Amino acid sequence: MRQRAFGIMVLAAAFLAACSPPKYARYKSVSGDFSAYVPWGWNVIAEADYDAFSEVKFIGPFDADFYLGAPSMSVRWYKRYRAHTLRDGRLEMYADADDFIDQMLKQVYGKDSVLLGGGRKYADQLILDDAKAIPEAPLKESGLTAKYFAVLSPAPAAPGVVGAVKDVDGNWHNMRYHEYVVIPMEGGFYVLSYPATQQGHDKAVDRFNYLANTFHPYMVGPGGPKILIRPAAAAPKP
């Protein structure tokens, strides 16, 4: 059954009474499959489609530098070879984490995009055709291996939309600067994303990196088998 849940993250009264709130709050998913430290006070929207797909989205306060006026980041789960229906009626399905990356780079962003890793442009543009060429790195909290990359890519936008920019020819664009952390798991994979704009990217990328480095799965996806991951010695603290 597809379910959607809406709510604003709330911490203990002792924290709420403090003069200055913390920068992060520990969030554990409704399904109990993961936890992570996320930005304090951001709204939380959760959605699940059986065990095939789930998404928890964190939405920040209004900021005109972000497309449609708000920064956001999300944690998504995809089960391998299981179709998921998008809100516009299209279906998506992925064989594995690399297939997800390949489809995103080719079908969502396209050949005019710039692929970035660690804040730099990849020298070999052929990497856009081969997700396996994206280097892997361990996440600090869990030690899990992940593929981290970003995409700089323009998309058409309606005139005057908040967060859109106008070029010298008068055309409006959403200058996407999207960050991804893709974590392969047995039977599926997690995708952590930060769909920022070029002008707003640096405002919350540290929060996204903190979410990724404190991401800790307890199950292989919602309702999946439990897994035990011992926190790494270098796990970051809020």
Image (cartoon, helix red, strand yellow):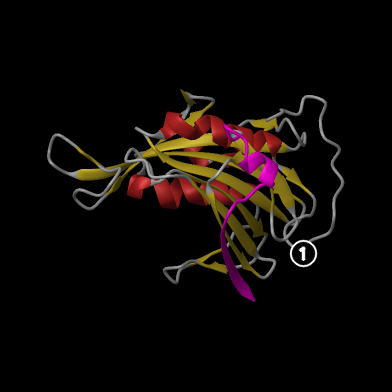
Look at the image and say whether residue 7 sits in the magenta stretch.
yes
**Left or right: residue 19 compared with residue 156:** right
Q: Is residue 220 above or below residue 118?
A: below
Q: Residues within 10 Å of mark 1 (few under 14, many from 20)?
A: few
What is the secondary structure assignment of the residue under circle 1? loop
Rendered-image quadrant of the C terminus: top right
Residue highlighted by disc 1: 223
Q: Front-most of 49 and 41?
A: 41
Can residue 213 be seen by looking at this rendering?
yes
| Residues drawn in magenta | 1-21
> On the image, which quarter does residue 175 sit in?
top left
The residue shown at (65%, 50%) is 190
Q: Is residue 222 left or right of residue 82?
A: right
Q: Residue 140's image quarter?
A: top right
Q: Is residue 126 visible?
A: no
x 43%, y 44%: residue:
61
